[in-house]
Structures are given as C-alpha cells and as structure tokens.
Image (cartoon, grey):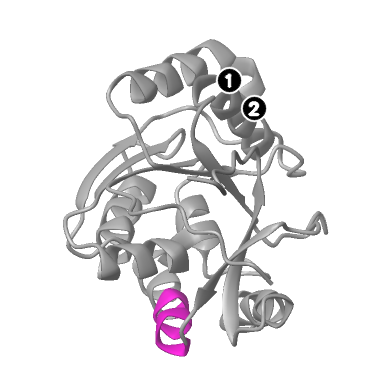
Amino acid sequence: MIALGAGRPDRVVAVGAHCDDIAIGAGGTLLTLCLARPGVRVDALVLSGGGGEREQEERAALAAFCPGADLRLTVLKLPDGRMPAHWEEAKAAVEELRGRTEPDLVLTPRTDDAHQDHRGLAKLMTTAFRDHLVLRYEIVKWDGDLGRPTAYQPLSQDVAEQKVRLLQEHYPSQRHRPWYDREAFLGLARIRGIECHARYAEAFDVAKLTLNLGG
C-alpha cells in the first residue's frame, strides 16, 4: 500500500449539513492533524442548527476536536432535512467560505450519501473547491449507505478513544439515537483500520487527486 501525503496542510476547510456531521465523519482526522500541526487554520461551516442548543454543542465540540487550531466556525439556521429547498442560501454560504480561504485540505460529506442534506452540500462543495484535495467523509446511519472508500487516515488508539469520548460528551442531544453509541463509532473505525493495516482509521472518498510523482 502506497501512502500519499497531502504535504503540510496549514489551512483546512470542514463542512457539515448538521451539527455533529464533521465530528462523526472526520473528528479523528481533525484531532490527528491539529495535534500534529499547532496553529493550523480550520474554517468550518455547518448549514443547520444555528441559534440554539445544537450550535452551542457544535462550538464546544469542534473546539475540542481542533485543539490549538485557529478555528473559525459558522453555523447557519437552514431547516434540517430541507437543504434542497434552500439551495440558494446554502450555495451563497459555500461561496462565501470559498472567498475567504485557500485551503490545503477540504473535508465534506459524500456525494452519494443517502441523506439529501449531506448529498446536496457535497455537490455544492464540488463546484466551489475545484483545485483542492477534497476528502469526503462517511456517516454511519440507518440507511446502510456505507461504500468502498479510497482514502484512509489511520487513528491511534488514543485518538480513536478520544473521538468517541468527545462525541458522547459534547452532543447530549443525540444520545437517544439508536446508532449513536461507542460500539458504532469504534466498530466502523476498526473495520476501516483493518482495510488500511491499522488498528483504527477514518475513511474517505477522494473526489479528484493530481499526482506529482516526478517533482
């Protein structure tokens, strides 16, 4: 297996349709990156949950998932489950995000995610961030839409455990969901770890990757 690095990312963009999407899909990757790169800039955008308990959860959670980072978080108030009907607002938010940063790495939902909000945001990101390394994270859910990822970020056992602890600690509003538990998160991380010869990992689809093997 060949490990292809993304250089030394100084700027990261992370987006989610809902509060907790980023942490579930890429929380371990953010922890790994921020612990290794103090001061890295993380521009995060969440489309729904603004102005209430969910935004408070998200702000506390992402601060914990991005230790030592220059975190700049925007949480909007689009209604959950209605992103396609609010396409123009979502598109304007993504374009505003694009206008204020030139990231080395972009973390987004998958374009084939079963949830229409996740899928719609992913498609918007594809048009706004055309010349960037875009990793599309996965979220386990009832729909059974997990695919065959093409990129992996191995997680140490400490980071994997910390991710699960932070998810449980910072999103009390989600604890009632039948899939929101330690076994689900660590189980998927263990499977993805097996696939890349690691104990744990987070997995992603790669939108497009340009190689520079002769550089």
Q: Main secondary structure of the magenta part?
A: helix
Tell me the quadrant of the picture where the N terminus can be found.
bottom right
**In the figure, residue 203 lies in which quadrant?**
bottom right
- The residue that disc 2 covers is 123
Q: Depth check: 194 or 144 in front?
A: 194
Does 65 sit left or right of 147 as displayed?
left
What residue is at 48 percent from the left and 27 percent from the top?
Answer: 78
Residue 17, horizontal then vertical, whole percent: 53, 39
Is residue 17 at all visible to an observer of this figure?
A: no
Whether residue 162 appears in magenta in the rendering, the answer is yes
Left or right placement of residue 136 versus residue 164 in this view: right
Q: Residue furthest top?
A: 88
In magenta, the rendered stretch is 157-164
User: Is 96 rendered above or below residue 140?
Assistant: above
- At label 1, counting other C-alpha atoms closer than 10 Å, the crowd grade (few under 14, some 14-19, many 20 or more) is few
Q: Is residue 70 magenta?
A: no
Q: Are marks 1 and 2 in contact (CB under 8 Å)?
A: yes
Q: Secondary structure at mark 2?
A: helix
Mark 1, secondary structure of its residue: helix
Quadrant of the rendered structure where residue 64 is? bottom left
Question: How many numbered discs?
Answer: 2
Which of the pair 74/66 is nearer the observer? 66
- The span from disc 1 to disc 2 (Cα, nearest Å) is 7 Å
**Residue plotted at (38% across, 49% down):** 54
Label 1 sits on residue: 127
